[in-house]
Amino acid sequence: MNAESPPARVRRERMLALLRERDFVRVNELATRFEVSEVTVRSDLGVLERRGALRRVRGGAVPRAASSIERPFEEAEARASHEKRAIGYAAAQLVDSWDTIILDVGSTTTAVAHALAARQDLGEVTVFTSSLTIALALEAAHPRLSVVVTGGTLRPKQHSLVEPLAGLVLHSIHASKLFLGCNGVDVEAGVTNVNLPETEIKRQMVAASQQRILCADSSKLGQVALAHVCELDDIDVLVTDAGANRVQVDALRAAGIDVQLVPATR
């Protein structure tokens, strides 16, 4: 291995980035590009395959067949409901009076909204959201919480709003905190989502916020969905349930994320 070649984690992230641009990468090409041996490349691809980020084939690797199943909001809300309620409560404690926050669409972030609405100690909080469900959940907390709905085209499956218009609002604000939902979070693949229109809105939310808090139940850890939202470097905090796989949690913490584990409520 060349003394100037990047550390293994960085090299693997770059391999994945290259794979996202193509349908196939060759072992010998990767060895030349990253100035490492083909044995090292095969080892890297093996690690990535075990994490579900790609699939190895003869001579190289191809993208993993990512999940493309989008569940309706009501179905997603019913899954791991106790875990999501606990995550919502813990995440809501990270909000302070006078904060300007963004609440992403999703069943877990809706749990955050319900927990926020119940906090009588909060005041002068402004919430931007692309979710009609979240807007309605926060309505009872007016005027302690002011709600701004981004606008845009309605997606009935998630009761969410996407382009056009949503980006116009997000491009014009600077929020103190973002509470982001996802379909997958993986050490190598980063944060991913199953739906392309909502993925674009999520990316704009990341760009519009100072602190990014990912809210995801433990079933999302180690999963890779269709569309890439952001890298792990863009996430500050992950709030998940205590049922999370410890190996995955350790790997995420080693990547620099503050992982907060919360026990499920009943």
Image (cartoon, grey):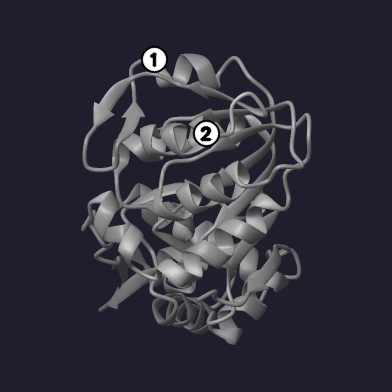
Q: Which quadrant holds the N terminus?
A: bottom right
Circle 2 Cα neighbour tier, 10 Å, few/some/many (<14 / 14–19 / ≥20):
few
Disc ID at residue 106: none
Whole-number angstrom distance, CA of label 2 to CA of label 1: 26 Å
Q: Which SS class for mark 1? A: loop
Q: Nearer the viewer, residue 52 or 73?
A: 73
Q: Position of residue 123 (x, y in %)?
A: 74, 31
Q: Amino acid at mark 1?
A: Leu
Residue 87 visible in this rendered orientation of the protein: yes
Q: Amino acid at mark 2?
A: Ala
Q: Position of residue 20 (x, y in %)?
A: 38, 52
Circle 1 Cα neighbour tier, 10 Å, few/some/many (<14 / 14–19 / ≥20):
few
State the residue at coordinates (49%, 70%): 83
Using the image, determine if residue 114 lies above or below residue 126: below
Q: Nearer the viewer, residue 233 or 157?
A: 157
Q: Quadrant of residue 240?
A: bottom right
Q: Which residue is mark 1?
A: 165
Using the image, determine if residue 51 lies above or below residue 208: below
Q: Position of residue 90 (x, y in %)?
A: 66, 60
Disc ID at residue 140: 2
On the picture, is 52 further left or further right than 14? left
State the residue at coordinates (29%, 50%): 73
Count of numbered badges drawn on the protein: 2
Between tags 2 and 1, which lies in front? 2
State the residue at coordinates (38%, 64%): 224
On the picture, is 245 further left or further right than 250? left
State the residue at coordinates (54%, 74%): 265
